[in-house]
Amino acid sequence: MVCPNSNPVVQQVCELYEQISRLENLSPSKDVNTLFTKLVHTCMPPNPIDVSKLCQKIQEIRSHLIKLCGEAEGLLESHYSKILGSFENPLHHLDIFPYFDNYIKLSLLEFNILTKNTTKTPNKIAFIGSGPLPLTSLVLATKHLTSTYFHNYDISSEANSLASRLVASDPDLSDRMTFHTTDVMDVTCALKDYDVVFLAALVGMDKEEKVKFVDHLAKYMAPGATLMLRSAHDARAFLYPVLDPCDLRGFEVLSVYHPTDEVINSVVIARKLPLPCVQPLDGLGSYVLPSKCACAEIHAFNPLNKMNLIEEFALEE
């Protein structure tokens, strides 16, 4: 295992973790904003860190740090969703959210990836873990997929209440955007209705939990439907859980993208395999879900650099 002192980035992340973990609460404030901004800027530059090879102590720090980041992100989104909901036309003021530009870039990236790997415009999209400020759905619905219906799933009724207020004054979006308060693990047959399912970065706070969600989607999504999920790479894995392409049992992984700019999340796109490929295990009612995945090298790139074409790496068996 790697000693934290062998990498200055890991050491700095640990120092910031100690400061963040001493905060009395993670609601937006000067101290909270400053520390998390420092953390993001520390993890953002490309750095060949394999978090799976770090020592147990650092693994535990990373696990706790991801949960703290998730809590802080949720509080930040709730804070700004409440502010936006006070406007007559909330959608006209989305840019007050401090990371709005990042969502614009991430949504464009995901739209381009989806377009390159599918043959038709999706009619219905499910976004799992939409939260109180569902910016991905809002940006996609208003800028890229203007006739698509979006079904947003979140386990929090308060989050959905705040989110629904943002579209209430817009006749088009209020017609095309639905909010469901439920645990997606309780959603079964309804998942077959969606052409595309997005899985938010913080649905599943560690790899094991996230794999459970993916296995559930593999069981109930329609064959041929598209799964898009967010992961993390290098030092950015201190901010979000990592899901390897080979963990997507029941899916054919089409491409993986590791941005190198201020967009933090990696993007994985996969296609649900046909149901006949699911094989029973030992006749006991359990199933082995196959995945088409090869251990190919996946290169980082900046999708917003107009001098570069977006490189696509298809992982094929």
Image (cartoon, helix red, strand yellow):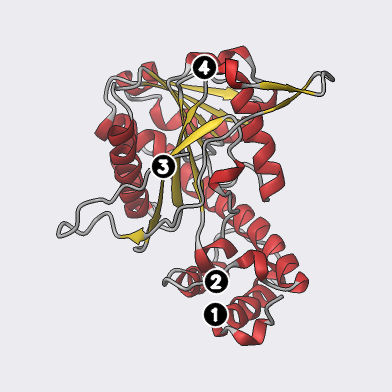
Q: In the picture shown, does residue 222 fall above or below 314?
A: above
Residue at the (40%, 39%) spot, across then down: 136
C-alpha span from label 1 to label 3: 36 Å
C-alpha span from label 2 to label 1: 9 Å
Proximity of marks 2 and 1: CB atoms separated by less than 8 Å: yes
Label 4 sits on what residue type?
A: Ala
| N-terminal-most mark, 4 or 1 | 1
Q: Is residue 222 left or right of residue 101?
A: right
| N-terminal-most mark, 1 or 3 | 1
| N-terminal-most mark, 2 or 4 | 2
Residue behind mark 2: 49
Residue behind mark 4: 222
Q: Quadrant of residue 280?
A: top right
Label 2 sits on what residue type?
A: Ile
Residue behind mark 1: 9
In this view, the residue in front, 6 or 275, is 275
Q: Is residue 21 left or right of residue 269?
A: right
